[in-house]
Image (cartoon, rainbow, N blue to C red):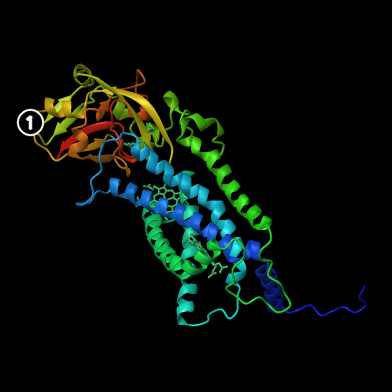
Amino acid sequence: MSTTTEPSPPLMGQIDAWRDDALADDRRHGPRPAALLGLALGVSFTVCFATGLLSHLIQHPTSWFTWFPRPAGLYRVTQGLHVATGIAAIPLLFTKLWAVFPHLLRTPVVRDVADGLERLSLLPLVGGSIFLLVTGVANIELFYPWPFFFPAGHHAVAWIVIGALIVHVGAKLSTTRDALARRAGPPLDEPIPAGRQATTGGDGLDRRRLLLWAAGGSAVLTVATIGQTVAPLRGLALLAPRRPDRGPQGFPVNRTAIEAGVVDAIASPAYRLTVSGGRAPLALTLADLHALPQRSATLPIACVEGWSASQRWTGPSLRDVLAAAGVTDHRGVDVHSLEASGRYASSTVPARVVADPDTLLALMVDGEQLAPDHGYPVRLIAPNRPGVLQTKWVGEVVVR
Ligand code: HEM
Ligand code: HEM
Ligand SMILES: Nc1nc2c(c(=O)[nH]1)N[C@H]1C(S)=C(S)[C@@H](COP(=O)(O)O)O[C@H]1N2
Ligand SMILES: [Mo]
């Protein structure tokens, strides 16, 4: 027992000691866990970036991008993957940050210009990664506390993060290669402080436990949310905001008829579906639509927010409605809702989607008249399209 009290070291000294202790713990703070967690993050962020860009292009087609109506359920898979992979990355990111924190506290802060640039790129990398995961999760939980339009902000930051990630991978390539090549700890980036021993070699139990915690966290989050799109697992989807079997007629609703302000318009006996832009404008009553040949197709609503649900829809094919209006030649159509305003009040149906016989102006779902919240009297439903493009309460079709 000591009788003299030692003066406590100043704050900076405490941080240095804390960092050096951590740095000496090679199994948790050394390059191998950083590289393994980095690889997992690299894969998940690449999947998110590719599927996110795909979703963007489908919603905002360019001259060089074409998207096909088949296979009917492909978008449901790519967007489900986007959200599931992003959610699974959350524990990976936080474990990685915990594993590398001593490297962030190192001194000197910057060694030279190249080192300074590389360190600077950690700011957008770490900040941007957290931003993507936080905004993504908030969005699927229908929580929009920020002043910008979510997809635009999320999209711009995704490019920044991918740029910073490329710089990071370039800077860490040789460390990653060494760390993965050798099971025992390779040399540390930083010199081991005098008087300390790097805990290299050994059985790697601490490292294994760290990586198991990260993998376990990802697995739990995935199982607790994936049921929003994988129907057999819906009973486990405790953290999913939407479940594919809950809502009117047994599936979810994003915007209700009341929220869209269409309650009176959809119930009006004066309702007509107008088809304009063809040889002569046409106004079809509900009875006219029921009198056209009816077709049924099992198609999913695949929301951009990662939930999806498949139903059997029935109604005339859009192409038959166009034929009834005498439209022979077109470059697709615009479908307008009775909803006066709102981001999803209209959508474009490209010609190759119009040509698909399963592209329906649905009147029924699972053998029942559509519920008001699902788009009564008429909704568009087409194969392999994001939910935002499956326009409800259709009042007008304009030929392009
Ligand atoms: C979102 C993705 C990622 C984030 C946020 C991230 C973050 C970080 C941070 C903050 C550091 C500590 C700073 C430093 O040592 O300079 C670091 C180190 C490291 N990262 Fe990443 N990283 C990511 C992806 C990756 C990928 C894809 C790889 C490899 C393929 C990787 C491999 C490494 C390695 C080898 C180290 C050095 C560890 C050491 O020297 O002990 N990281 N990462
Ligand atoms: C928890 C993680 C994440 C969730 C929950 C999430 C969720 C979403 C959602 C709901 C959308 C659709 C937005 C819309 O069209 O309304 C989206 C789009 C997108 N996401 Fe994520 N995301 C996550 C992580 C990421 C990551 C890590 C990246 C990139 C590295 C990324 C890149 C994109 C891109 C580029 C888009 C397209 C935006 C657009 O349409 O302009 N996301 N994400
Ligand atoms: N007119 C209109 N149609 C719309 C929307 C909308 O807000 N207004 N929301 C879209 C979105 S985001 C989705 S996911 C689907 C949901 O369809 P559901 O409510 O029948 O499940 O409808 C789409 N059609
Ligand atoms: Mo949606």
One can see residue 280 in this view: yes
| Label tally | 1
- Asked if residue 126 is positioned above or below residue 326 in the image, the reply reads below
Image quarter in which the N terminus is found:
bottom right
- Asked if residue 90 is positioned above or below residue 28 in the image, the reply reads above
Nearer to me, 132 or 284: 132
Left or right: 328 in relation to 113:
left
Q: Residue lying farthest bottom?
A: 112
One can see residue 142 in this view: no
In percent of width and height, residue 48 lies at: 42, 51
Q: Is the CB–ligand 3 distance for label 1 below 8 Å?
A: no
Q: Quadrant of residue 109?
A: bottom right
In percent of width and height, residue 277 lies at: 11, 36
Q: Quadrant of residue 24?
A: bottom right
Report the residue at 64% width, 61% height from top. 28
Q: Quadrant of residue 313?
A: top left
Image quarter in which the C terminus is found:
top left
In percent of width and height, residue 334 lies at: 20, 39
Label 1: how many residues lie within 10 Å, few (<14), some (14-19) or many (20+)? few
Residue where numbered disc 1 is placed: 280
Left or right: 6 in relation to 186:
right
- Asked if residue 288 is positioned above or below residue 160 in the image, the reply reads above
> In what element is the residue under mark 1?
loop
| Amino acid on which the number 1 mark rests in the picture | Ala
Left or right: 17 in relation to 218:
right
Left or right: 134 in relation to 187:
left
In percent of width and height, residue 54 lies at: 33, 48
Nearer to me, 260 or 33: 33
Report the residue at 49% width, 38% height from top. 226
